[in-house]
Amino acid sequence: MRGIAIRAILWLVWSGLAAAPGGLVAQGGVDPSKVGYFNFVVAIRSKGKTRIEVEGRTVGRDGLRSGEESGPLGLLAGRYDIVVENDDCRPLRRKLTVEAGQSVVYVLYDVEKEEGGKTVRLTRAARIDRAPAAGDHPLSVYSVVQEPEVLPLSLGGRRALRARWKEMLDVPGWDGKGFRLMHQQRSLGSVENAEETGLHYLLVPYRDHRGRLRMITTAMGDWAAARKKDGKE
């Protein structure tokens, strides 16, 4: 999972600026203890890109495709307006709350709703901000697969799991070694050896625009501490 740590670069903070409700301040004036982290994970059933804006600033150059993540971003603690748009779904507008020292994952997904005899698709965001469980390599599964509501999975074809729609499933006892997440003997994706300790790894099963099962691997935790511990600062 080295790629996760490489992408753990604070948006505007480590690049020299930090966004704040009142404007922008130079990096030298940023107190790291007042910075919170967030990461957008796109699990929307769409072939097109999803455009995300935070206080009018675009996350990513021109949006993120299903299965992609923004990587950990950082802002000063506060509340921010976000807009999520996708051509296949109605847009989502909501407040993003950033708390100092907290690491949050926003899983973006879609649901269907009947309106006036027509089926419309709505964009939703699940905020995951649980404190990491004990151990060097906490691991959890958060499924946004609606059918079946209970998704049978296994780690490397050995350890059986039952992931329910939008319920956090903790997987105790992970030793940090790589494995494949399987569904009915089919691999949804692989997880590399965890090289960073203190991060809470999260697996997000979802369906793509063709209805195929996929998986996103991400993490939450103290990114600054993880980078220092691994000698990346």
Image: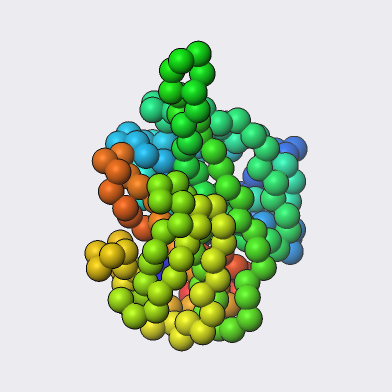
Seen from the viewer's position, the closer of residues 102 and 176 is 176
Name the residue at 47% across, 37% down: 110
Seen from the viewer's position, the closer of residues 144 and 191 is 144
**Is 196 located above or below residue 13 in the figure?**
below
Note whether residue 220 is visible.
yes
Display colour scheme:
rainbow
The location of residue 144, given as percent across then percent down, is 47, 50
Report how many numbered discs are placed on residues in the image. 0
Which residue sits furthest top? Answer: 116
The location of residue 191, given as percent across then percent down, is 36, 71
Task: Say left or right for 213 vs 129.
Answer: left
Name the residue at 60% across, 56% down: 128
**Is 64 located above or below residue 5 in the figure?**
above
Name the residue at 57% across, 61% down: 168
Task: Say left or right for 34 vs 169.
Answer: right
State which quadrant residue 20 falls in. Answer: top right
The location of residue 186, given as percent across then percent down, is 24, 64
Seen from the viewer's position, the closer of residues 62 and 96 is 96
Note whether residue 73 is visible.
no
The location of residue 218, given as percent across then percent down, is 46, 62
Name the residue at 63% across, 72% down: 132
Task: Say left or right for 117 vs 54.
Answer: left
State which quadrant residue 223 falls in. Answer: bottom right
Looking at the figure, which quarter contains the N terminus?
bottom left
